[in-house]
Amino acid sequence: MSAARLPLHIDPLRLAKTGARLHGSLPMAGMERLGSLLAAKPGDVTLSLTFDLDPDLRVAVLHLQLQAELELSCQRCLDTLKHPVAIDRRLGVVMNELQAEQLPEEYEPLLATPEPLFLRDVIEDELILCLPIVPRHAEHVCGLKMKEETLSETATSHPFAALAELKNTD
């Protein structure tokens, strides 16, 4: 398929039989679950999908490569944090949990159904899985460190110093 037209739906089993390759970019604006986790409006994700059959396991395989830049909120300073994403993953297409358990460690399971999968949903799931649990800048970059240093310089008095003075006046 060309980079200009990515399909809305994919049938990974059929595409694996033909050895299909999909390349292009997909706007992340329609990915509502991902969008709710971002600090700013998302851009595009560049993707490369290669479908194949693993001859030893007799299972369909999807080699997924994604690149994007996500803007998250730093949980220290609440400023915007640019989070580059580069995913290179192999997914084994399975029909049930038993097949998923039998996959070797090199494959992540992709649960397929008789109906075609929404390509956008597969990509969105992978992007969500790569997000950090607690997004934050590196300590030397974070704006909060500078704010904390300023606060510690100004707040050198002890909060109960006034009580100690009252006690001494008795």
Image (spheres, grey):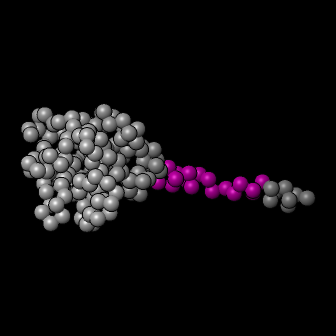
Question: Which residue corresponds to the image point at 42% horizontal and 54% vertical from the top-left?
Answer: 133
Magenta run includes residue 51: no
Q: Is residue 94 visible?
A: yes
Stretch in magenta: 145-162
Magenta run includes residue 149: yes
Which of the two residues, 110 or 34, is positioned nearer the viewer here? 110
Image quadrant where residue 47 sits: top left
Question: Which residue corresponds to the image point at 75% horizontal and 57% vertical from the top-left?
Answer: 161
Q: Quadrant of the N terminus?
A: top left
Q: Is residue 117 above or below residue 133?
A: above
Q: Is residue 44 visible?
A: no
Q: Is residue 122 above or below residue 106?
A: above
Q: Quadrant of the C terminus?
A: bottom right
Which of the two residues, 134 or 111, is positioned nearer the viewer here? 111
The dominant secondary structure in magenta is helix
Question: Which residue corresponds to the image point at 18% horizontal and 64% vertical from the top-left?
Answer: 57
Residue 130 in picture, x, y percent from top left: 33, 52
Residue 102 in picture, x, y percent from top left: 29, 65
